[in-house]
């Protein structure tokens, strides 16, 4: 693994803007439509004396993606934070990744999938794998996408909302504008064979995460934890606070 530590930079003060205050009725109406979103999640018990650890999956992911990683970290002594003490970003930068992403082609291939009704799951999955192969050439990436193929009353459909994702892909692959940096420790953990974290991203990483480290796991692609499981778990555990 190659390790690079970014120099610290002084955070710029956020610009203050005066905005007109909305009328009381409008403000009340706006508050009335704000609701919390219930997120599907899986919880793995850990040691109560360690800081909690929250794992968030990416696009096309689900709560089952990091189960093996979570169990491995729990065995080594990690738990789950009601406040963020430190941050790990896995193979993604705080910039737009649309130029390096092939997700648009993957979505088109997934939408064009044709699987007859009533097939056994193993046969349907193999047929889907064959149809995706010309576009999604990496076997491990195809297997990751195929975790979203589910059977509903004899029909095979995608669990994720491909229409919504395709219509908003540019927004999803973008990164919101922030002026105030995150002051805590941060690790940007990428795969050496992936284009999602490159040297051109370092200035923005440094601006938003002045205490950031950038680390690459040799031989890993975008799905770092799947390509190099032990190396990934070790890098994460080494970044966590000591016992």
Image (cartoon, rainbow, N blue to C red):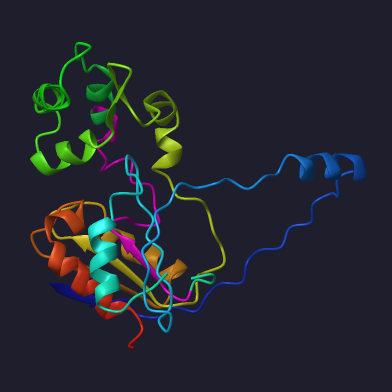
* Residue 167 visible: yes
User: Which quadrant does the N terminus fall into?
Assistant: bottom left
**165 shown above or below 232:** above
Q: Quadrant of residue 53?
A: bottom left
**8 shown above or below 163:** below
Of residues 41 and 104, the one nearer the viewer is 41
Q: Is residue 102 magenta?
A: yes
**65 shown above or below 170:** below
Of residues 119 and 125, the one nearer the viewer is 119
**184 shown above or below 164:** below
Q: Residue at x 35, y 30 (%)?
A: 159
Give the image location of residue 15, x and y in percent.
Answer: 66, 63
Give the image location of residue 37, x and y in percent.
Answer: 58, 45
Q: Is residue 13 left or right of residue 74?
A: right
What stretch of residues is rendered in magenta?
85-105
User: Which quadrant does the C terminus fall into?
Assistant: bottom left
Q: Is residue 113 left or right of residue 219?
A: right
**Outermost residue to the bottom:** 243
Q: Quadrant of residue 185?
A: bottom left
Q: Residue at x 34, y 45 (%)?
A: 62
Q: Is residue 218 left or right of residue 235?
A: left
Q: Quadrant of residue 26?
A: top right
Main SS of the magenta part reads: loop
Q: Residue at x 36, y 49 (%)?
A: 63
Give the image location of residue 52, x and y in percent.
Answer: 43, 73
């Amino acid at each position: 693994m190659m390790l690079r530590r970014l120099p610290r930079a002084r955070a710029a003060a956020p610009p203050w803007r005066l905005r007109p205050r909305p009328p009381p009725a409008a403000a009340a109406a706006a508050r009335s439509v704000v609701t919390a979103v219930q997120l599907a999640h899986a919880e793995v018990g850990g040691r109560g004396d360690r800081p909690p650890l929250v794992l968030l999956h990416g696009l096309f992911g689900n709560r089952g993606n990091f189960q093996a990683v979570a169990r491995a970290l729990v065995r080594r002594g990690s738990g789950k934070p009601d406040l963020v003490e430190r941050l790990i970003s896995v193979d993604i930068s705080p910039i737009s990744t649309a130029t390096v992403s092939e997700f648009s082609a993957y979505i088109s291939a997934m939408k064009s999938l044709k699987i007859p009704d009533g097939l056994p799951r193993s046969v349907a999955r193999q047929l889907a794998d064959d149809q995706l192969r010309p576009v999604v050439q990496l076997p491990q990436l195809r297997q990751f996408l195929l975790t979203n193929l589910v059977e509903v009353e004899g029909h095979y459909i995608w669990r994720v909302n491909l229409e919504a994702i395709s219509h908003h892909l540019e927004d999803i692959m973008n990164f919101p504008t922030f002026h105030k940096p995150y002051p805590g420790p941060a690790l940007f953990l990428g795969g050496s064979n992936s284009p999602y974290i490159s040297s051109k991203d370092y200035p923005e990483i440094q601006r938003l995460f002045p205490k950031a480290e950038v680390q690459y796991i040799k031989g890993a692609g975008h799905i770092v934890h799947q390509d190099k499981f032990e190396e990934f778990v070790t890098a994460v555990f080494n970044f966590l606070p000591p016992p």
